[in-house]
Amino acid sequence: MTGTRNRVLAVLLSLLAMFSMSTGVHADQPFHFGFKKSKNGQPASIDQEGFKAILEKNGAIFTGDPNKKELFLTFDNGYENGYTAKVLDTLKEKKVPALFFVTGHYIEDQPELLKRMVNEGHIIGNHSWSHPDMTRISDEKVRTELEKVKSEVTAVTGQQEMRYLRPPRGIFSDRTLAVSHQAGYTNVFWSVAYKDWDVKDQKGWKYAFDKVTAQLHPGAIILLHSVSKDNAEALGKIIDEARKQGYEFKSLDELTKKP
Protein backbone atom coordinates (compact mmCIF):
# COMPACT_ATOMS: atom_id res chain seq x y z
CA MET A 1 0.00 0.00 0.00
CA THR A 2 2.82 2.36 0.90
CA GLY A 3 4.51 1.61 -2.42
CA THR A 4 1.33 2.41 -4.33
CA ARG A 5 0.91 5.73 -2.51
CA ASN A 6 4.52 6.60 -3.25
CA ARG A 7 4.06 5.84 -6.94
CA VAL A 8 0.90 7.99 -7.07
CA LEU A 9 2.71 10.82 -5.31
CA ALA A 10 5.60 10.53 -7.73
CA VAL A 11 3.24 10.77 -10.70
CA LEU A 12 1.51 13.83 -9.24
CA LEU A 13 4.83 15.54 -8.58
CA SER A 14 5.94 14.71 -12.10
CA LEU A 15 2.78 16.22 -13.58
CA LEU A 16 3.23 19.34 -11.47
CA ALA A 17 6.82 19.66 -12.62
CA MET A 18 5.74 19.22 -16.25
CA PHE A 19 3.14 21.97 -15.86
CA SER A 20 5.70 24.30 -14.29
CA MET A 21 8.16 23.58 -17.09
CA SER A 22 5.51 24.07 -19.79
CA THR A 23 4.46 27.45 -18.43
CA GLY A 24 7.97 28.46 -17.43
CA VAL A 25 6.66 29.93 -14.20
CA HIS A 26 6.18 29.08 -10.56
CA ALA A 27 3.07 29.67 -8.47
CA ASP A 28 4.28 32.93 -6.89
CA GLN A 29 5.77 34.54 -9.99
CA PRO A 30 4.00 37.89 -10.43
CA PHE A 31 2.63 39.08 -13.75
CA HIS A 32 1.29 42.42 -14.91
CA PHE A 33 -1.62 41.89 -17.28
CA GLY A 34 -0.93 43.01 -20.81
CA PHE A 35 -2.28 42.21 -24.26
CA LYS A 36 -1.88 42.91 -27.96
CA LYS A 37 -4.46 45.54 -28.83
CA SER A 38 -7.15 44.96 -31.41
CA LYS A 39 -6.86 46.65 -34.80
CA ASN A 40 -9.57 46.77 -37.45
CA GLY A 41 -11.94 44.69 -35.34
CA GLN A 42 -9.57 41.74 -34.98
CA PRO A 43 -9.50 40.02 -31.56
CA ALA A 44 -7.12 41.31 -28.92
CA SER A 45 -4.54 38.68 -28.00
CA ILE A 46 -2.54 37.36 -25.06
CA ASP A 47 -0.92 34.64 -27.16
CA GLN A 48 2.47 36.27 -26.78
CA GLU A 49 2.18 36.70 -23.02
CA GLY A 50 3.73 34.28 -20.57
CA PHE A 51 0.60 33.85 -18.52
CA LYS A 52 -2.04 32.60 -20.95
CA ALA A 53 -1.99 29.04 -19.57
CA ILE A 54 -2.30 30.37 -16.01
CA LEU A 55 -5.40 32.41 -16.83
CA GLU A 56 -7.01 29.44 -18.58
CA LYS A 57 -6.12 27.07 -15.75
CA ASN A 58 -7.78 29.32 -13.15
CA GLY A 59 -10.87 30.27 -15.12
CA ALA A 60 -9.86 33.92 -15.60
CA ILE A 61 -11.19 35.86 -18.58
CA PHE A 62 -10.10 38.88 -20.57
CA THR A 63 -12.52 38.75 -23.49
CA GLY A 64 -15.73 37.09 -24.60
CA ASP A 65 -16.81 35.22 -27.72
CA PRO A 66 -14.77 36.49 -30.71
CA ASN A 67 -17.62 35.51 -33.03
CA LYS A 68 -20.29 37.67 -31.41
CA LYS A 69 -20.54 41.44 -31.65
CA GLU A 70 -21.00 41.81 -27.92
CA LEU A 71 -19.25 44.30 -25.63
CA PHE A 72 -18.90 44.20 -21.85
CA LEU A 73 -18.36 47.52 -20.11
CA THR A 74 -16.39 47.60 -16.86
CA PHE A 75 -15.13 50.41 -14.62
CA ASP A 76 -12.48 50.47 -11.91
CA ASN A 77 -13.52 52.65 -8.97
CA GLY A 78 -10.68 53.09 -6.53
CA TYR A 79 -11.80 56.55 -5.46
CA GLU A 80 -14.38 59.11 -6.55
CA ASN A 81 -13.37 62.08 -8.66
CA GLY A 82 -16.79 63.56 -9.32
CA TYR A 83 -17.64 61.80 -12.60
CA THR A 84 -19.35 58.53 -11.67
CA ALA A 85 -22.79 60.15 -11.40
CA LYS A 86 -22.42 61.41 -14.98
CA VAL A 87 -21.31 57.93 -16.06
CA LEU A 88 -24.40 56.44 -14.41
CA ASP A 89 -26.62 59.06 -16.03
CA THR A 90 -25.29 58.07 -19.45
CA LEU A 91 -25.65 54.34 -18.79
CA LYS A 92 -29.24 54.88 -17.70
CA GLU A 93 -30.05 57.03 -20.72
CA LYS A 94 -28.47 54.54 -23.14
CA LYS A 95 -29.78 51.45 -21.30
CA VAL A 96 -26.32 49.88 -20.98
CA PRO A 97 -25.33 47.54 -18.11
CA ALA A 98 -21.91 47.84 -16.51
CA LEU A 99 -19.72 46.19 -13.92
CA PHE A 100 -18.05 48.44 -11.32
CA PHE A 101 -15.01 47.10 -9.46
CA VAL A 102 -14.72 48.88 -6.11
CA THR A 103 -12.23 49.16 -3.27
CA GLY A 104 -12.76 49.55 0.46
CA HIS A 105 -12.11 53.27 0.25
CA TYR A 106 -14.84 53.66 -2.37
CA ILE A 107 -17.32 51.67 -0.30
CA GLU A 108 -16.76 53.82 2.78
CA ASP A 109 -16.65 57.09 0.84
CA GLN A 110 -19.49 56.65 -1.68
CA PRO A 111 -22.32 54.50 -0.31
CA GLU A 112 -24.99 56.43 -2.19
CA LEU A 113 -23.30 55.85 -5.55
CA LEU A 114 -23.00 52.15 -4.71
CA LYS A 115 -26.71 51.99 -3.98
CA ARG A 116 -27.45 53.74 -7.23
CA MET A 117 -25.31 51.26 -9.19
CA VAL A 118 -27.27 48.32 -7.83
CA ASN A 119 -30.65 50.02 -8.05
CA GLU A 120 -30.06 50.81 -11.71
CA GLY A 121 -29.18 47.21 -12.56
CA HIS A 122 -25.41 47.26 -12.57
CA ILE A 123 -23.08 44.74 -10.93
CA ILE A 124 -20.53 45.60 -8.25
CA GLY A 125 -17.33 43.60 -8.39
CA ASN A 126 -14.36 43.20 -6.08
CA HIS A 127 -11.21 45.28 -6.48
CA SER A 128 -9.87 44.33 -3.00
CA TRP A 129 -10.22 46.28 0.20
CA SER A 130 -6.88 48.11 0.32
CA HIS A 131 -5.68 47.73 -3.30
CA PRO A 132 -2.52 45.74 -2.49
CA ASP A 133 -0.22 43.81 -4.78
CA MET A 134 -1.87 40.50 -3.95
CA THR A 135 1.16 38.50 -5.04
CA ARG A 136 2.94 39.92 -1.97
CA ILE A 137 0.36 38.89 0.63
CA SER A 138 -0.62 35.52 2.07
CA ASP A 139 -3.54 33.37 0.97
CA GLU A 140 -5.34 34.24 4.19
CA LYS A 141 -4.83 37.96 3.60
CA VAL A 142 -6.09 37.65 0.03
CA ARG A 143 -9.27 36.00 1.28
CA THR A 144 -9.68 38.67 3.98
CA GLU A 145 -9.30 41.49 1.43
CA LEU A 146 -11.99 39.97 -0.77
CA GLU A 147 -14.43 38.98 1.96
CA LYS A 148 -14.39 42.45 3.52
CA VAL A 149 -15.36 44.07 0.23
CA LYS A 150 -18.13 41.56 -0.35
CA SER A 151 -19.63 41.86 3.12
CA GLU A 152 -19.49 45.67 3.17
CA VAL A 153 -21.07 45.97 -0.28
CA THR A 154 -23.85 43.69 0.90
CA ALA A 155 -24.35 45.82 4.00
CA VAL A 156 -24.58 49.02 1.94
CA THR A 157 -26.52 47.86 -1.12
CA GLY A 158 -28.12 44.52 -0.35
CA GLN A 159 -26.26 42.87 -3.25
CA GLN A 160 -25.84 39.34 -1.95
CA GLU A 161 -23.60 37.84 -4.59
CA MET A 162 -20.12 38.91 -5.65
CA ARG A 163 -18.69 36.78 -8.40
CA TYR A 164 -16.15 38.99 -10.18
CA LEU A 165 -12.70 40.17 -9.17
CA ARG A 166 -10.27 42.50 -10.87
CA PRO A 167 -6.82 42.14 -9.31
CA PRO A 168 -5.46 45.51 -8.16
CA ARG A 169 -3.15 47.08 -10.73
CA GLY A 170 -3.62 44.01 -12.90
CA ILE A 171 -0.95 42.18 -10.90
CA PHE A 172 -1.48 38.47 -10.29
CA SER A 173 0.17 35.09 -9.97
CA ASP A 174 -0.92 31.50 -10.39
CA ARG A 175 -1.37 31.36 -6.61
CA THR A 176 -3.50 34.49 -6.27
CA LEU A 177 -5.72 33.46 -9.18
CA ALA A 178 -6.16 30.01 -7.64
CA VAL A 179 -6.97 31.35 -4.15
CA SER A 180 -9.55 33.82 -5.45
CA HIS A 181 -11.05 31.30 -7.86
CA GLN A 182 -11.45 28.83 -5.01
CA ALA A 183 -13.24 31.60 -3.10
CA GLY A 184 -15.83 31.74 -5.89
CA TYR A 185 -14.46 34.56 -8.05
CA THR A 186 -13.94 34.87 -11.77
CA ASN A 187 -10.92 37.07 -12.34
CA VAL A 188 -11.84 39.59 -15.03
CA PHE A 189 -9.12 41.29 -17.05
CA TRP A 190 -9.73 43.32 -20.23
CA SER A 191 -9.16 43.53 -23.98
CA VAL A 192 -9.80 47.25 -24.53
CA ALA A 193 -8.05 49.91 -22.44
CA TYR A 194 -5.91 53.01 -22.65
CA LYS A 195 -4.07 55.28 -20.23
CA ASP A 196 -7.11 56.99 -18.72
CA TRP A 197 -6.37 56.85 -15.00
CA ASP A 198 -4.01 59.84 -14.80
CA VAL A 199 -6.29 62.72 -13.79
CA LYS A 200 -3.48 65.19 -14.54
CA ASP A 201 -3.20 63.99 -18.14
CA GLN A 202 -6.72 64.30 -19.53
CA LYS A 203 -6.79 65.19 -23.21
CA GLY A 204 -10.44 65.75 -24.04
CA TRP A 205 -13.42 63.55 -24.90
CA LYS A 206 -12.30 63.05 -28.52
CA TYR A 207 -9.05 61.45 -27.37
CA ALA A 208 -10.94 58.97 -25.18
CA PHE A 209 -13.45 58.30 -27.96
CA ASP A 210 -10.71 57.59 -30.50
CA LYS A 211 -8.68 55.37 -28.15
CA VAL A 212 -11.65 53.18 -27.22
CA THR A 213 -13.44 52.91 -30.57
CA ALA A 214 -10.20 52.06 -32.40
CA GLN A 215 -9.88 48.93 -30.25
CA LEU A 216 -13.44 47.60 -30.45
CA HIS A 217 -13.71 43.94 -31.41
CA PRO A 218 -16.28 41.15 -30.94
CA GLY A 219 -16.41 39.98 -27.33
CA ALA A 220 -14.40 42.90 -25.96
CA ILE A 221 -14.23 43.52 -22.23
CA ILE A 222 -13.69 47.27 -21.95
CA LEU A 223 -11.81 48.74 -18.98
CA LEU A 224 -12.42 52.39 -18.13
CA HIS A 225 -11.57 54.35 -15.00
CA SER A 226 -14.37 56.48 -13.63
CA VAL A 227 -11.94 59.13 -12.35
CA SER A 228 -11.43 60.25 -15.95
CA LYS A 229 -13.22 63.39 -17.08
CA ASP A 230 -12.56 62.37 -20.67
CA ASN A 231 -14.32 59.04 -20.18
CA ALA A 232 -17.37 60.63 -18.59
CA GLU A 233 -17.74 63.07 -21.49
CA ALA A 234 -17.02 60.51 -24.22
CA LEU A 235 -19.05 57.58 -22.91
CA GLY A 236 -22.34 58.37 -24.62
CA LYS A 237 -20.59 58.94 -27.93
CA ILE A 238 -18.62 55.68 -27.55
CA ILE A 239 -21.84 53.75 -26.94
CA ASP A 240 -23.53 55.34 -29.94
CA GLU A 241 -20.58 54.60 -32.22
CA ALA A 242 -20.33 50.99 -31.04
CA ARG A 243 -24.01 50.44 -31.72
CA LYS A 244 -23.63 52.08 -35.12
CA GLN A 245 -21.00 49.43 -35.86
CA GLY A 246 -23.45 46.70 -34.90
CA TYR A 247 -22.31 45.95 -31.36
CA GLU A 248 -24.56 45.16 -28.41
CA PHE A 249 -23.66 45.93 -24.79
CA LYS A 250 -24.23 42.96 -22.50
CA SER A 251 -23.93 42.25 -18.79
CA LEU A 252 -20.96 40.09 -17.89
CA ASP A 253 -23.44 37.68 -16.32
CA GLU A 254 -24.68 36.90 -19.83
CA LEU A 255 -21.16 35.78 -20.72
CA THR A 256 -20.14 33.83 -17.63
CA LYS A 257 -23.46 32.14 -16.90
CA LYS A 258 -23.86 30.70 -20.39
CA PRO A 259 -23.68 26.87 -20.61
Image (tube, rainbow, N blue to C red):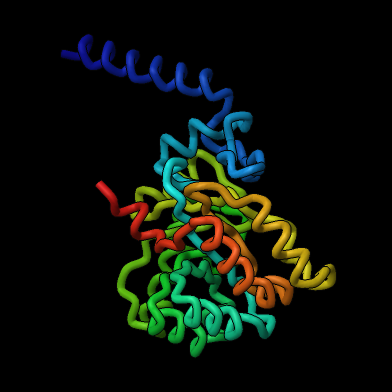
Q: Residue at x 44, y 76 (%)?
A: 95
Q: How many marks?
A: 0
Residue 68 appearing in the image: yes
Give x and y (percent) for residue 230.
73, 72
Q: Residue at x 57, y 28 (%)?
A: 25
Of 37 and 107, which appears nearest the observer? Answer: 37
Q: Residue at x 52, y 67 (%)?
A: 101
**Which quadrant of the structure image shows residue 117?**
bottom left
Q: Is residue 248 left or right of residue 183?
A: right
Q: Residue at x 38, y 77 (%)?
A: 121
Classify 56 as above or below 258: above
Of 221 and 104, which appears nearest the observer? Answer: 221
**Which quadrant of the structure image shows residue 14?**
top left
Tell me the quadrant of the picture where the N terminus can be found: top left
Residue 135 appearing in the image: no
Q: Is residue 163 left or right of residue 28?
A: left
Of 33 and 39, which appears nearest the observer? Answer: 39
Of 129 and 106, which appears nearest the observer? Answer: 106
Give x and y (percent) for residue 61.
46, 46
Give x and y (percent) for residue 108.
54, 84
Classify 117 as above or below 145: below
Give x and y (percent) for residue 78.
62, 71
Q: Is residue 6 left or right of residue 248?
A: left
Q: Is residue 193 left or right of residue 183?
A: right
Q: Residue furthest bottom?
A: 112
Q: Residue furthest left?
A: 1
